[in-house]
Amino acid sequence: MKVLVAVKRVIDYNVKIRVKPDHSDVDLTNVKMALNPFCEIAVEEAVRLKERGVATEVVAVTVGPKAAQEQLRTALALGADRAIHVETDERVESLGAAKALAKLVAEEQPGLVILGKQAIDTDNNQTGQMLAALTGLPQGTFASEVKVEGEKLQVTREVDGGLQTVELSLPAIVTTDLRLNEPRYAKLPDIMKAKKKPLDVKTPADLGVEVASKVKLLKVEPPAERQGGVKVGSVDELVDKLKNEAKVL
């Protein structure tokens, strides 16, 4: 079974985000970029399926600028067999990414598609669901456990009330939650080997899709700085402050 894993290039989660002086966007100058943490979990799960003999090939895919090949090489170092880069300098939103991925699903015919449930930059949590709608494949979102049994896939999902287990027919789409696994670190020999693994470059035009965003970014503002807390001497004083200062009552 072939497993297709979608990954995304994002700002490293350890970096403090800066906004451009003109508030037009986030400042990416000299900013460290990394593989989206949820995508790392997706790659790890695909590699584990291969190690258990369930999967025969792991293909990493990304839609983004040329620099995103760095994140594809990271996925290859973590255990993916080959990579596909849909190269574009456009700002790609969830639907554009899902359209490109749907074309690759049609071309590659994977038995399973795994994505992170969301990216830490936009936090949309949309691409996996949109991909399922475009391809007509069953989906298991927010997966904390994945089991493949023959032509069936059991996905334990994290929901508001606890855990829910659904059974899907393969091929299917899964989006990963934090507790699915703990990604491994890429070893130096694997990083060196990744440089020789095949990486195929395509364009949205090659796939016959348009990935340009239909959403116009008007302004970016940093979050308001939080003020320090204060101690109150009584419940009455607390209620007074909530009413007259915070104005939440």
Image (cartoon, rainbow, N blue to C red):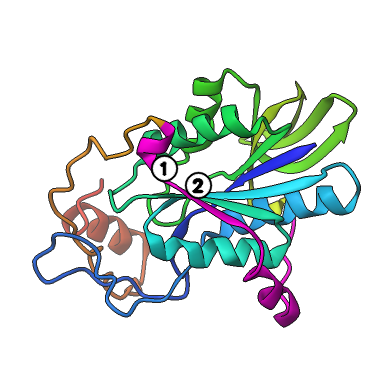
To which residue does mark 1 refer? Answer: 124
Which residue corresponds to the image point at 76% horizontal and 46% vertical from the top-left?
A: 57
Crowd rating for badge 1 (residues with CA inside 10 Å; few <14, some 14–19, many 20+): few
Which residue corresponds to the image point at 51% horizontal and 30% vertical from the top-left?
A: 102
Q: Dividing the picture into quarters, in which one does residue 29 lie?
A: bottom left
Q: Position of residue 221 (x, y in %)?
A: 19, 60
Residue 237, can we see it? yes
Q: Position of residue 226 (x, y in %)?
A: 28, 69
User: How many marks can you see?
Assistant: 2
Magenta-span inclusion, residue 223:
no
To which residue does mark 2 refer? Answer: 118
Q: Are marks 1 and 2 in contact (CB under 8 Å)?
A: yes
Mark identifier at residue 242: none
Crowd rating for badge 2 (residues with CA inside 10 Å; few <14, some 14–19, many 20+): many
Query: Looking at the picture, which amino acid does disc 2 mark?
Result: Gln
Determine whether, in the image, residue 186 is placed left or right of residue 13. Answer: right
Determine whether, in the image, residue 25 is placed left or right of residue 110. Answer: left
Does residue 235 sit above or below 101 in this rendering?
below
> Mark 2: which secondary structure?
loop
Which residue corresponds to the image point at 83% horizontal and 25% vertical from the top-left?
A: 152
Q: Position of residue 53 (x, y in %)?
A: 91, 46
Query: Looking at the picture, which amino acid does disc 1 mark?
Result: Asn
Name the N-terminal-most of marks 1 and 2.
2
Determine whether, in the image, residue 232 is placed left or right of residue 156. Answer: left
Q: In the picture, which quadrant includes the N terminus?
A: top right
Determine whether, in the image, residue 193 is placed left or right of residue 31. Answer: right
> Mark 1: which secondary structure?
loop
Q: In the picture, which quadrant includes the C terminus?
A: top left
Residues shaded magenta: 181-207
Q: Dividing the picture into quarters, in which one does residue 212 lie?
A: top left
